[in-house]
């Protein structure tokens, strides 16, 4: 007698810069053996291969636009082709790609909410992950992330669009232990449902 393969658990952790996405994804990778996928890595590879600058957020949006013009599923190809049973996505903000993963796999989208002042402080602490934003003032930081709030094209990053389809919202302006406990409860619920 063979047992059925367990359902895939795909979790998209989304939030604005400095909200704790990478920290939560690393936590899931370490404590629950999730495979980690960073859409930003695919974007950076595409930019490098095509000599596209990535100096400000609008550069990322423009690069993303060019990438999905060639292949609308470009940002999720690694997830679509992965055989992993548990995948954690670090910051997929495109509503159409997120919806596709929800429809195919029942993927779950978790928004991390955090006030801008705390996010800004977090970014200042991590120049390696935050790139150009680590040298910005609070006003520059806020202006730089404006392109992420709304895009009419559902293939591009849009926090408005992601918030509308998110399954959970987690307040990440708390001690990390509390945030991780809430994430653990969400994952436990997904595991018991599969």
Image (spheres, rainbow, N blue to C red):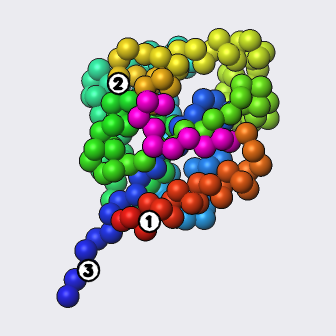
Q: Is residue 121 depicted above or below 169 in this figure? A: above
Where residue 96 appears, x then y in whole percent? 33, 30
User: How far separated are the C-alphas under marks 2 and 1?
Assistant: 29 Å
Circle nearer the N terminus (2, 1): 2
Q: Is residue 48 above or below residue 193?
A: above
Q: For the residue labelled by badge 3, is the local secondary structure a helix, a strand or a loop?
A: loop
Q: Which image quarter is the C terminus in?
A: bottom left
Q: Quadrant of residue 100?
A: top left
- Asked where in the image residue 172 lies, by quadrant, the reply is top right
Q: Which mark is residue 191?
A: 1
State the residue at coordinates (65%, 11%).
Answer: 143
Residue 66 magenta-highlighted: no
Q: Secondary structure at mark 1?
A: helix
Q: Secondary structure at mark 2?
A: loop
Outermost residue, bottom direction? Answer: 1
Marks 1 and 3, the one that precedes in the sequence: 3
**Residue 47 shows which numbered tag?**
none
Q: Are circles 2 and 1 on residues that touch, CB within 8 Å?
A: no
Q: 64 and 122: which one is in front? A: 122
User: In the rendered view, does 129 fall on the left or right side of 185?
Assistant: right
Q: Which residue is at 32% across, 63% downward? A: 7
Which region of the structure is painted magenta?
Answer: 163-172
Extreme residue toward the left, this view? 1
Q: Do we see residue 36 in this rendering? A: yes
Relative to 179, say whether 32 is above or below. below
Q: Which residue is mark 2?
A: 155
Task: Measuring from the top left, give residue 80's x and y in whole percent.
Answer: 30, 47
**Residue at which label 3 appears:** 3
Q: Measuring 71% from the left and 25% from the top, which residue is drawn there? A: 116
Q: Is residue 4 left or right of residue 179?
A: left
Report the number of discs.
Answer: 3
């Amino acid at each position: 007698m063979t047992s059925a393969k367990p359902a895939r658990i795909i979790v998209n952790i989304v939030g604005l810069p400095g909200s704790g996405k990478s920290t939560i994804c690393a936590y899931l990778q370490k404590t629950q053996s999730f495979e980690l996928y960073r859409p930003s890595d695919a974007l950076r590879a595409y930019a490098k291969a095509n000599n596209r600058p990535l100096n400000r957020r609008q550069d990322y949006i423009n690069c993303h636009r060019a990438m999905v013009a060639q292949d609308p599923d470009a940002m999720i190809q690694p997830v679509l082709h992965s055989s992993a049973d548990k995948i954690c996505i670090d910051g997929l903000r495109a509503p159409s790609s997120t919806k596709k993963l929800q429809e195919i796999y029942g993927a779950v989208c978790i928004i991390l909410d955090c006030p801008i002042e705390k996010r800004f402080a977090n970014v200042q602490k991590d120049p390696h992950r935050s790139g150009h934003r680590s040298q910005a003032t609070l006003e520059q930081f806020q202006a730089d992330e404006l392109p992420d709030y709304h895009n009419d094209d559902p293939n591009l990053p849009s926090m408005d669009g992601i918030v509308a389809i998110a399954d959970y919202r987690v307040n990440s302006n708390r001690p990390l232990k509390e945030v991780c406990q809430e994430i653990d409860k969400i994952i436990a619920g997904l595991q018991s449902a599969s």
